[in-house]
């Protein structure tokens, strides 16, 4: 047992050096991996004693891998359309299962892409990270502007990004603005017509025709008809418009029109027409501005992130709305999480729980779209450790050789 004790310190040291080489090699190999947290080897004293009932431990050292997961890497811009970095605390939440049935893993690597799945003959597209894990976030409410959030990962869902799951529903027009000038020097009885496109409940665009007729000095009549509806010429009461000597409108500035559309599923709606901008100046009849709300149905064309972690969808009808929101996920003791891959970690009994925050409602962390957090590997430090480890390894090999020579000499003396 005494002879074995001569070899134990050098053998344990050589094994520790070998582990240190592995860590250094891993750090160097991942020096360009976004979100990678460099590890380092610490050497702990191994006290003589029994590790189990059969084998003894005769001292030496043992390697302990330490990884500073909470250390932030430098953020740099990237070319990835879905790349995003976290500044400050926090992690992205991922899961290998769409429904979140597997272990939730946390990462700082925001190198995201799209993965298409064939589910029962239906193609579905999800946001995934570089490891193929599904990225989880809060879904937007039906209004596309608010979110129902929660403090735990159970409030998150896998972010599905495809046309079938994200459709911009058609909206009927309820307000319209018409800003124009009516020629003050126009002859009595002359007319001026203009059109505004308005949408019914099914998203069909229909022409709302405005006809202005000069009734007399500083007086015009406005007649309105809406195509594809029950509002035809003469149905809507003529609106009398009056102007003062300076050409400013003095009569009512709004009027309500309630068309019932004749196309199937066209429905009916009340459109409030704002004509407060009308003027009567000498010169030509001129339309300055026309606006209205409402839209046709739109299919998802592209997505983008903002600094609050909100993923917005851009649709074929020219509209956009929020789809999901990334949480800033803060772990109580991140350095005590279990390592799953080079960039992904899982909660452990010592790490504590994960708390979810909204980036725009906390100072824990924020998002930087179009950027990635770089690896925390320092090449200068790793090569210094490599040289230091080489010297230690050589010394330990020499110590083993000396112990071997002493053992051989003692054996020869006994003979």
Image: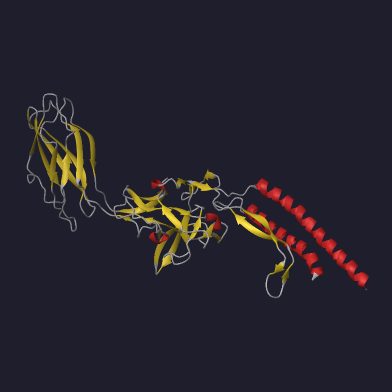
**Percent coordinates x, y for residue 288 in the rendering:** 23, 33
Asked whether residue 241 is in view, the answer is: yes
Q: Is residue 119 left or right of residue 335?
A: left
**Residue located 13% across and 48% down the image:** 258
Left or right: where does residue 229 sit relative to residue 22? Answer: left
Color theme of the render? secondary structure
In the foreground, 165 or 100: 100
x and y percent of residue 12 in the render?
Answer: 73, 63
Which residue corresponds to the image point at 13% horizontal and 50% vertical from the top-left? 259
Q: In this view, does 310 lie to the left or right of 398?
A: left
Q: Nearer the viewer, residue 161 or 262?
A: 161
Query: Which residue is rendered at x = 24% and y = 40% of the image?
Result: 291
Q: Is residue 296 above or below residue 62?
A: above
* Image quadrant where one finds the N terminus: bottom right
Tally of numbered tags: 0
Which residue sits at x=27%, y=51%? Answer: 296
**Quadrant location of the C terminus in the rendered image:** bottom right
Residue 315 in view in this figure: no
- The answer to which image quadrant residue 342 occupies is bottom right
**Left or right side of 107 for 240:** left
Spot occupied by residue 113 in the image (x, y as percentages of width and height): 47, 55
Kindly give the residue lying farthest to the bottom in the view shown.
54
Toward the viewer: 321 or 222? 321
Q: Position of residue 46 (x, y in %)?
A: 70, 62
């Amino acid at each position: 047992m005494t002879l074995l004790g001569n070899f134990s310190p050098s053998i344990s040291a050589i094994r520790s050096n070998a582990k240190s080489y592995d860590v250094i090699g891993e750090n160097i190999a991942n020096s360009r991996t976004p979100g990678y947290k460099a590890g380092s080897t610490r050497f702990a004293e191994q006290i003589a004693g029994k590790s189990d009932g059969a084998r003894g431990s005769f001292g030496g050292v043992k390697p302990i891998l330490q990884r500073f997961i909470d250390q932030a890497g430098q953020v740099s811009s990237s070319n990835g359309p879905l790349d995003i970095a976290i500044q400050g605390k926090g992690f992205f939440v991922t899961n290998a299962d769409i429904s979140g049935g597997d272990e939730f893993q946390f990462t700082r690597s925001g190198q995201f892409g799209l993965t298409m799945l064939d589910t029962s003959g239906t193609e579905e597209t999800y946001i995934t990270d570089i490891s193929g894990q599904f990225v989880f976030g809060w879904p937007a409410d039906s209004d596309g502007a608010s979110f129902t959030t929660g403090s735990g990962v159970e409030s998150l869902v896998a972010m599905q990004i495809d046309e079938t799951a994200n459709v911009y529903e058609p909206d009927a027009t309820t307000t319209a603005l018409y800003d124009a000038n009516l020629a003050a020097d126009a002859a009595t009885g002359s007319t001026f017509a203009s059109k505004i496109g308005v949408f019914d409940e099914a998203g069909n665009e229909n022409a709302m025709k405005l006809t202005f007729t000069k009734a007399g000095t500083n007086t015009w009549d406005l007649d309105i008809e809406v195509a594809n509806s029950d509002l035809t010429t003469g149905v809507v009461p003529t609106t009398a418009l009056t102007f003062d000597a300076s050409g400013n409108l003095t009569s009512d500035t709004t009027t309500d029109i309630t068309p019932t559309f004749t196309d199937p599923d066209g429905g009916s709606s009340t459109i409030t027409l704002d004509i407060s901008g009308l003027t009567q100046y000498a010169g030509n009849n001129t339309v300055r501005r026309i606006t209205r709300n409402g839209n046709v149905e739109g299919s998802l064309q592209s997505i983008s992130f903002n600094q609050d972690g909100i993923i917005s969808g851009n649709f074929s009808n020219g509209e956009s709305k929020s789809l999901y929101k990334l949480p800033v996920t803060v772990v109580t003791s991140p350095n005590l999480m279990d390592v799953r891959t080079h960039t992904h970690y899982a909660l452990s009994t010592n790490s504590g729980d994960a708390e979810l925050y909204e980036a725009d409602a906390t100072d824990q962390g924020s998002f930087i779209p179009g950027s990635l957090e770089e690896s925390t590997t320092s090449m200068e430090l790793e090569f210094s450790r490599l040289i230091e480890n080489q010297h230690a390894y050589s010394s330990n090999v020499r110590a083993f050789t000396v112990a071997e020579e002493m053992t051989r000499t003692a054996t020869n003396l006994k003979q």
